[in-house]
Every structure is written in C-alpha cells, then in structure tokens.
Amino acid sequence: MRPVRPDISASRGNDGKWSVLWLIVAFPVFWTLYASLSRYNLDRMGDMVENFAWGISWQLGYYKHPPFYSWITAAWFSVFPRTDFFYHLLASMSVTVALLAIWRISTRFFTVGQQRALLVAVFFLPPLTFLTRNYNATSAMLPLWAFTFLFYLRVLERRRSLDAVLLGVLGGCAILTKYHSVVLVIAIALHALLDRDVRGLLLTRLPVLAMAAGALVLAPHLWWMWNSDFITVRYASEQGDGNWRDTLIYAARFIPVVFLYSAPMFAVLGFYRRLGDGYPLFSWPQVAEFWTTSQGRALVCVAALPPVITIVLGLALDALVSSLWSIPFFVFIPFFVVALLPRELTSGRRLLAPIAIGAYAVILLVLAPVVRGQSLAASQHNSAVPISGIAQAAQTAWYQVVDGRFAIVAGQSNLYANGTAFYAPDRPYAIQGQSLKLTPWVTKGDIAREGAAFVCNAASQERCEAAATALFGRVDQAVPFSVPAPAGAKKTTNWEMVLLVRNPD
C-alpha cells in the first residue's frame, strides 16, 4: 500500500539526502542563536519557567494542562544547565524533531528537490519559527503530531504490530501534552473509517493494539483527573468569557489567520520561479495526486479536518479559538503549498537554499539586538522583569537568615515563584497561585520541616505578609534586597524586593 512516488531519477542518491539533512541541522543552530540574542527573558508570559516548576514535581497532571511537556522540560534540565540558552535550544530541538518526521513523511510524496523546497519554506514559516520560541503546551505538540502521523502511515504501509503500538503511544503522548491533540486523533480515525482502501484494516488486531497502547499511556492521567475533580477541564472551560459574539469573532478569523501564516511560504517558493518559465502559476494536478493514494488521502484528512474540528469544538464549548492553536496544523499545511510549485522547478537551483537561508539568517541576527532593545523599551507583560537576578538574590537573602536548603518558594506572582524555581541554584519547589491546593506536591508538613519563602515587591509588603501568613502559618523574618533594572528597560530604577521567610521548625 505504498504511494505512487514521483520520479526521483534526477536525484543524486545520498548527495540529495545530505542536501536535505543539512537544512534540518541548521534549524536549531540558527533559531537558538536568534532567540538568545533577541530576548531578555525567556518569554513574556512566564510559561517557560512555569513548565519547569511543574515538571520537577513529576505529577500526573497540573491544574492548567496535562503533564507531558513539563516532564520533557524537567528531563531536559536534568541533563543540561538551567540557562536561557539551553531552554532556547530545547524549543528549537522540539521543532527540529518535528522537521525530521516531516521530512520522512515527505519522502513518500516528493522528489528530493521538493523535499528540499519544503524544508526551505518551513525555515521562513512563522508558526514553526518565531511562534515556537516559546516552548509551551502548544509548541510541544509539533513533534508528537508529526511522528503520530508518520507511524499512522507506517501502519498503513507495513501493517506491523510495533508500528500500531507506537502510533497509540505517540497519540496518547500528544493528548497528554495538550487535550487539543484529540482533533488529530479524530482526523486519523475518520480517515481509517472513510477510506475504502483502509477500512479493512479496522478488522485486524492493529487498531486494537493502537487504542490499547494509547489508553495505557492516558490511564494514569485519567485517574488523576478523576481524583482532582477534572481541574484541567474546568480550567479550560473557564477561559471563555461567555460572550458568544467574541466566540464567533475568534472562530471567524481563525481560518484567515492560518492563510496569513502561510503567506511567507508562497513568497519563498516564488524564488524558484522565473518570468516565462513555461509552467502554470500553480500545479493543481500535483495537489490532486494526494487523493490517488491512501497515504495521500490520510495527509489531506489530517491537514483539513483538525482546523474544522477545532472551530466546531470551540463554538460548542464557548471557547475563544486562539490563532496560536493553529501552530500544530503547520506540520501538514506546507505539503500542499509546496505541491502547488511544479516539481520540475525544484530539481535545479541547488544553491537557492543556502543563499536564501544564509541571507535571512544574517538579516535576523543583525536585527536581533534591536528586537531585544524594543522589547525592553516596551516592557510589556514580563519582558523586562529581571527574574533571573530576582531569583538568585532571593536565594542569597534566604541564606542570610536560614542555615538550610532553599526548598519552597511562593510569590506575589507566579512569575516570581516559578522563576525562582528555575533560576535559583537550590531549585526550590514553587507554590502555584499562592495555593497548596494547586500545588499538591508541597504540604504544610513540608513547609514546617523545611521552611519557605515568599518573593514580593517591597511596595506590596503588607499585602504579601498577609498572603504569606495564610499560606505558611507565620512569617518570621522579612529580608529586603535590590536587583538592578536591565539596561534599556522602561523602569530604570532598581527593583526593590523583600523575601518573607518562614523558618523551619
């Protein structure tokens, strides 16, 4: 059941393969460097330090999201230093792993020239580049979606039990990363049900193996959900404001935004064209070729159905369908954009990829310090908060009054608590939302035995003392400390902070 492959006789064997692989290798190198030069903090919203603060507790779930991507973060930093550079590297490697699967999928449909064009186009695609600099639940779905579909194709082609088990495991892990991944699983199931060439597969052991493997992966989390009163589902349901007008507006602009995100690919692929090249503007017959094989029809299903299912579920649940939810769809959308380019035009111009990517890289690296400076000057959300300095100064303040490990921290904001968990050398557990209910891995007994601290702006000390007393039982000492503001930030004076300490018993 292999697809009818285009003629690749013009490819040059391993040389063609290496011309594709260098693009995959270049991706994490460049985007890690760019993110490191263009950002003062990891991200504006504090998602990335939150991932880590959750992951190091190794829970079966957290109050906002399922746990898999937080586990990946914790595992990564059990090997690599806790620095911004290595976090940017994690974000880049996550997409790179997705690119590896995208490439393996593309070998079923494209010549080497088209494979190369696909990866060049992805290099310029915002949802897989700029928007994935924040490693979070949404961007973490990318490699899992890509490999889930790759192993679905392998099941169609080889009908091996191992592939079916891995399909189930990967699909389960995708849902365990973000519940939104259920739309991919639904799309795959619908293809298996509706494709006449695949339907017979449902009568074999393979779908049973896949479902059993997926259920086994999800079972511990489902048990956790039951025992936590479905807190993640309740959190998701509370994100809408109950205003149907806003819900409809978000849904209506979702698909147009997907097309806008795709626009840079058309611009890049335009470099393969020349006036009077004798080929049609778009090669619609190449797009139609996807429909001639079961694998191609599967690709059509996973590209077309998830956006539709997402909108339907958003309307049904009164959820604001964010344009960022489209990020994992771009595992599949680029295939159809590249298919519009006549394949004969991709066989030559081998220098186009290194020249285009090299020029783009130089421009962005030159602009990176400017982007960083503008972000600091705007100081939106948490972009200019010196959270690394606050975290390290907080640990220094702790050791001024306590002779024991800095083990537990809370904060006036989650950023203060989670940032301290990531940047402080002792790697304390961070209490979420000033609530032990949201932080079941920290107990009152832990606080009594090991002590705890509350990070606060000095101007809010009175309010923070009340919150810390309610949380810790008492506050024994208040240790002031000061952290310089970053150069170029809107706030030019030092950050005056206070650490409210509850001593160990």
Image: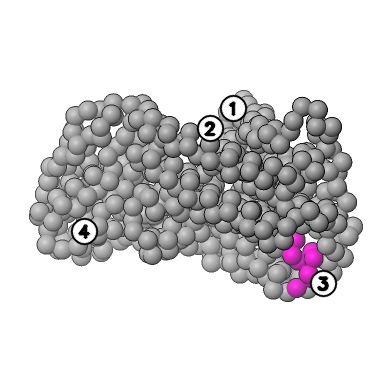
Figure quadrant of residue 352: top right
- Magenta run includes residue 155: yes
Dot placed on the residue nearer the N-terminal end, 3 or 2: 3
**Residue beneath the point at 18% across and 33% down:** 494
Of 105 and 444, the residue lying toward us = 105
Dot placed on the residue nearer the N-terminal end, 4 or 1: 1
Camera-side mark, 3 or 2: 3
Other residues around mark 3 within 10 Å, as few (<14) / some (14–19) / many (≥20): few
**Residue beneath the point at 79% across and 53% down:** 10
Q: Which residue is mark 3?
A: 204
Amino acid type at circle 1 is: Asp
Q: Secondary structure at mark 1?
A: helix
Image side of residue 48 versus residue 23, left or right: left
Amino acid type at circle 4 is: Phe
Query: Which label sits on residue 246?
Result: 1
Image side of residue 80 versus residue 257, left or right: left
Image side of residue 152 versus residue 430, left or right: right
Query: Which label sits on residue 406?
Result: 4
Of 419 and 250, the residue lying toward us = 419
What is the C-alpha distance between the residues marked 3 and 4?
56 Å
Other residues around mark 4 within 10 Å, as few (<14) / some (14–19) / many (≥20): many
What is the C-alpha distance between the residues marked 1 and 3?
46 Å
Q: Secondary structure at mark 4?
A: loop
Dot placed on the residue nearer the N-terminal end, 2 or 1: 2
Q: Which residues are magenta?
A: 153-160
Other residues around mark 1 within 10 Å, as few (<14) / some (14–19) / many (≥20): some
Amino acid type at circle 2 is: Asp
Q: Are marks 2 and 1 in contact (CB under 8 Å)?
A: yes
Residue 435 point in image, percent of width and height: 34, 50
